[in-house]
Amino acid sequence: TDALFYSGSLLKRMDWPPLKDEWQLDERHDSFNAHVDKANIASYDWSALLYLNSVGEEFGGGELLFHDSDADRSVRPIGGRVVAFSSGLENLHRVMPMQWGRRYVLSMWFTCSA
């Protein structure tokens, strides 16, 4: 079967300069370092991001960067844009450092296992 099942989600914001409160991205979670989602949680088979605001308007920096074998590829956060990708080693990625403002994103993960 090709069914997907919900595995988790996280609504967070990134601020520059950083703020200290419950909405701020946890300092221990460093999305600026290249990572693979499945390495964090083994059940993650698919990842998705829903951007709730736009780079250049409400914040600077914070682009999603995929490190592919032939080149790095950047995704600009635009409010309403959904980016979905498999969560394995084939999608090594990171978030570019924030430069100014406040970035909101809903991160979601899905599994193929019921």
Image (tube, helix red, strand yellow):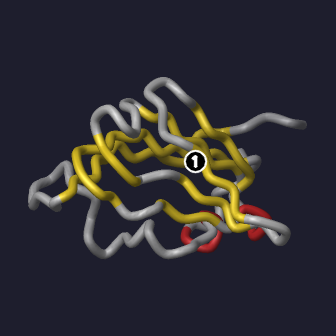
> Front-most of 93 and 7?
93
Residue 39 at what x, y percent from top left?
Answer: 62, 73
Where, by quadrant of the figure, is residue 42 drawn?
Answer: bottom right
| Residue at image coords 30%, 43% | 59
Give how far across and how far down residue 10 sits, in percent.
39, 47
| Extreme-left residue of the structure | 20
Give the SS element for disc 1.
strand
**30 in relation to 77, above or below:** below
Residue 5 appears left or right of 56: right
What x and y, as percent, mark residue 29? 37, 70
Q: Is residue 95 above or below residue 69?
A: above
Considering every residue shown, the one lying at the far top of the view is 80
Which residue is found at the position 44% from the left and 27% from the top?
79
The residue drawn where x is 62% and y is 48% is 47
Q: Which residue lies furthest to the front in this view?
A: 56
Q: Nearer the viewer, residue 19 or 2?
A: 19
The quarter of the image holding the N terminus is: top right
- Is residue 94 positioned above or below 12 on the image? below
Question: In the visual, does 81 lie left or right of 10?
Answer: right
Residue that label 1 marks: 109
**Label 1: few (<14), some or many (≥20) within 10 Å?**
many
Which quadrant holds residue 81? top right
Looking at the image, residue 84 sits to the left or right of residue 104; the answer is right
Quadrant where the image shows the C terminus = top right
Q: Residue at x 32, y 32 (%)?
A: 57
Left or right: 7 with respect to 99?
A: right
Q: Quadrant of residue 6?
A: top right
Q: How many marks?
A: 1
**Amino acid type at image mark 1:** Trp
